[in-house]
Amino acid sequence: MLIQRISKENVGTVELDLICKNGRRIPTEYNCSVINDHQGHSKYIIAIGRDLRERKKVAYQLQQSQKMEAIGTLAGGIAHDFNNLLSVITGNISYALNALNIDDERHELLSEVLKSSKQAQKLTYQLLTFSKGGEPVKKISNINKILEESAIFSTSGAKTNCRFEFADDLWLSDFDEGQMNQVFSNLIINANQAMPNGGTIRIKTQNTEVETDSGLTLSAGPYIKIMIEDQGIGIHKQHLHNIFEPYYTTKQNGNGLGLAIVYSIITKHEGHIDVYSEVEKGTVFNIYLPALIRKMVENIKQKEINHVGQGRILIMDDQEPILKMAGRMLNRMGYETDFAFDGSETIEKYRKAYHEKNPFDIVILDLTIPGGMAMAFGQ
């Protein structure tokens, strides 16, 4: 059928999978042309082939990004509203705890409520990783420490053990410690679950230079490579292309968010993650993070202090309970507070205070502003 069509049209394009000796399939595209003999009859077909692996990879990355953007719109809105409610709860409980003696029975009860509320907040942070509100708050650090802490905590009490192969001269990286802890915890928990009878999780870090023609969806330059390998049940080939999709899971009790969150976090760190797996042999996840080539700088641990200050603070939020909670805490620290519910009111109060020679020292704004700020400037 294909040969007949090409012979009729003299040209044609076809996509085929080349099957290697090891069974691996390579997607290819062929541009075909017909060569006629001196009588005008079709005699040969000449075809020029092209490897489509890179194009397919880029198309998949684009499709994945579009899916993340779609779910981010939904998740971000839900998480923002829910987080506002939890902020009021945790803020007021913290304030009440400071007013109670630690030996008071109510202190213990409120501490338990606060602990549960913070666990609920972690769920909203998971949703926020899909949205613009979940952008990483980065600081320069060494990834080895975060990896080791996450691995030890995630395998505590399990039959598996971890084998660390950390590069001693590992370059520094700029990352969000909380989000990266979430990435490693998800991957190590998955590795642990893939080996119900026990085994070894190999965790390796190394410095690497990514070249322009590396085949990875990364800019050329220095990167930290992190490898997490298990000896578990593996992932079937038909599932590999879907494992990073939101709500896709092959686990009976899974929610399909773990690896989707991992993918979203790594992408927001301008990194790359890929996976290789063989059934009954194991799975390897490779993560690439942009590196900062500089000497290690020891972090100076700050002693915890009770903050006391002075000055005028203007707070804008459309939720009155949040304004009350924030005002109560700042007043206790020694600050004078005023409140606004939208952008227009914020600008008006700021201007009035400035002209009256009693300006605000700090202005705290909600991330999302009802009605935007354009109305405040008369635009």
Image: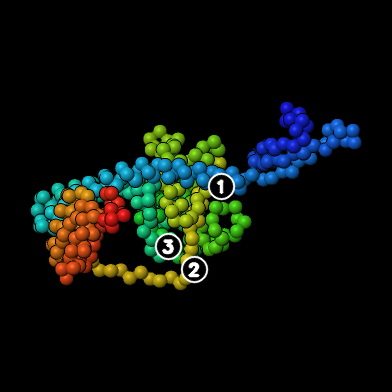
In terms of depth relative to the viewer, which is nearer, 223 or 100?
223
Q: Earlier in the sequence, mark 2 or mark 3?
A: 3
Q: Are marks 2 and 3 in contact (CB under 8 Å)?
A: no
Instruction: Look at 45% across and 42% down and name the residue there.
Output: 67
Residue projecting furthest to the right: 38
Q: Quadrant of the C terminus?
A: bottom left
Question: What type is the residue that disc 1 sits on?
Answer: Val
Q: From the top left corner, tell me how far across and down residue 373 is, in percent.
A: 29, 54
The mark nearer the N terminus, 3 or 1, is: 1
Q: Nearer the viewer, mark 2 or mark 1?
A: 1
Q: Residues within 10 Å of mark 1 (few under 14, many from 20)?
A: some
The residue that appears at 45% across and 35% down in the rendered structure is 250
At 64% across and 41% down in the image, what residue appears?
27
Tag 1 residue:
58
Q: Secondary structure at mark 3?
A: strand
Give the residue number, with chain letter if any, for mark 3: 174
Determine the CA span between mark 2 and mark 1. Answer: 28 Å
Q: Is residue 331 above or below residue 182?
A: below
Q: Kindly identify which numbered label has been placed on residue 293.
A: 2
- Name which residue type carries label 3: Asp
Circle 2 residues within 10 Å: few <14, some 14–19, many ≥20: few
In the picture as drawn, the residue positioned furthest to the front comes out as: 378
N-terminal of the pair, mark 2 or mark 1, is 1
The answer to whether 215 appears left or right of 359 in the picture is right
- Report the amino acid beneath label 2: Ile
Quadrant hosting residue 366: bottom left
Q: Are marks 2 and 1 in contact (CB under 8 Å)?
A: no
Q: How is the image coloured?
A: rainbow
On screen, residue 332 versus residue 131, left or right, reads left
Residue closest to the eye, 71 or 187: 71
Q: Position of residue 208 (x, y in %)?
A: 55, 61
